[in-house]
Image (cartoon, grey):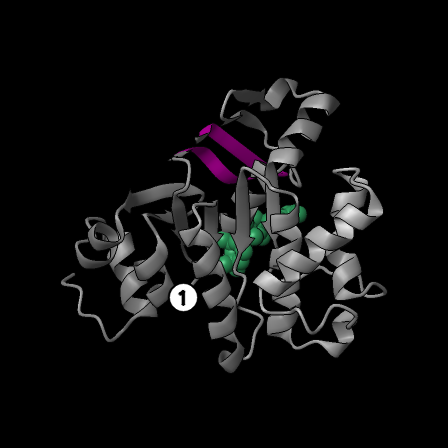
């Protein structure tokens, strides 16, 4: 179970997150939607301390971190429990697919090399890249690179995987293969928070949908509640813009 309590973040005088509360049950897939600049990426980055929140509390299972008084040790522990999949993949360019996945196992998990290698091969096979172990990122398509990114996140066996628009940098024909992999691991019961504009995916895979705007959670609920019966005007406007074929009465 992950609980965010009153998470806030400002850049200078601009308050980007305004006391965000969010609870995610174990095994749940939460999709976050919202217009550009609403704070989605910042929220994910706060959850694993790529961005230091201005205040609030992050709890994962029994572990609790008070953002105002977090020590290095706490942050290290939090990072062990979270993994992020980035929009731009963020792979090491000079390492092969296999080496990219092994890196975290060697450095963070401190596994012996042979064990790290075996585990990484199994994960790359799982994401359909068993034939690309020795390829460098430049020799892989965007969809393949992102699947390496997903294998790398899975390798760390985090309590939660954070996906920040994992398919938005991809050509349309490559989106499906990445979503299929995310769907597959969602079915295995891995807890996920996913920022995406893929509405079909959100409807199918999400247990819980959160709509953010202006640094606050405007509305949240099941996919049916948010997509079929949005209550808030801002949610209706947003959904209408991104899925014009749906007719929301506003
Ligand atoms: N490092 C930073 N320094 C200053 N301002 C920032 C920084 N990072 C984000 N912001 C600002 O915070 C706000 C929220 O940004 P964020 O990237 O979280 O939005 P988003 O919802 O992910 O948008 P998008 O859909 O475009 O990815 C924006 O106004 C952005 O300009
Ligand atoms: Mg973003």
In which quadrant will I find the N terminus?
top left
| Residue 13 spot, x, y in % from top left | 59, 38
Q: Would you say residue 214 is visible in this rendering?
A: yes
Residue 225 position within the rendered picture, expressed as x and y whole percent measured from the top left: 20, 50
Could you tell me which residue is drawn at 60 percent across and 49 percent down?
Answer: 154
* Residue under pointer 1: 198
Is residue 29 positioned above or below 109 on the image? Answer: below
Q: State the predominant SS element of the stretch in magenta.
A: strand
SS of the residue under disc 1: loop
Q: Which residues are magenta?
A: 3-22
Residue 112 location, quadrant: top right
User: Callout 1 environment at 10 Å: few (<14), some (14 to 19), or many (20+)?
Assistant: some
The answer to whether residue 56 is left or right of residue 81 is left
* Residue 131, magenta (yes or no): no
Side (left or right) of 240 relative to 185: left
Residue ranking furthest to the right: 94
Q: Is residue 38 visible?
A: no
Question: Of residues 170 and 241, which is closer to you in this image?
Answer: 170
Compared to residue 138, the image places residue 105 above or below, namely: above
Q: Residue 31 vs residue 50: left or right? A: left
Name the foreground residue: 213 vs 125. Answer: 125
Placement of the C terminus among the 4 image quadrants:
bottom left
Q: Where residue 59 appears, x then y in whole percent?
A: 50, 25
Query: Which residue in the rendered view is the most extreme toward the left?
Result: 249
Q: Quadrant of residue 94?
A: bottom right
- In the foreground, 157 or 178: 157
Query: Residue at the spot x=66%, y=35% of the render?
Result: 79
């Amino acid at each position: 179970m992950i609980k965010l309590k009153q998470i806030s973040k400002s850049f200078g005088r601009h308050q980007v997150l305004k006391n965000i509360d969010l609870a995610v049950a174990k095994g749940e897939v939460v999709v976050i939607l919202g217009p550009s600049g609403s704070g989605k990426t910042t929220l994910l980055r706060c959850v694993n301390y790529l961005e230091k929140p201005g205040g609030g509390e992050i709890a994962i299972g029994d572990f609790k971190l008070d953002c105002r008084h977090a020590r290095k040790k706490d942050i290290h522990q939090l990072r062990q429990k979270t993994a992020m999949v980035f929009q731009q993949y963020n792979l090491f360019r000079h390492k092969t697919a296999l080496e990219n996945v092994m890196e975290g196992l060697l450095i963070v998990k401190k596994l012996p090399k042979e064990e790290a290698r075996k585990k990484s091969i199994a994960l790359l096979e799982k994401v359909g890249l068993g034939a690309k172990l020795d390829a460098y990122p430049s020799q892989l398509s965007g969809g393949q690179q992102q699947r390496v990114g997903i294998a790398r996140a899975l390798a760390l066996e985090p309590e939660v995987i954070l996906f920040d628009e994992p398919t938005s940098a991809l050509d349309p024909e490559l989106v499906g293969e990445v979503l299929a992999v995310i769907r597959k691991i969602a079915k295995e019961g891995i807890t996920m928070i996913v920022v995406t504009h893929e509405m079909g995916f959100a409807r199918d895979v999400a247990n819980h949908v959160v709509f953010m705007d202006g640094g606050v959670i405007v509305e949240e609920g099941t996919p049916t509640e948010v997509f079929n019966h949005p209550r808030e005007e801002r949610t209706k406007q947003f959904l209408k813009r991104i899925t014009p074929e749906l007719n929301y009465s506003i």
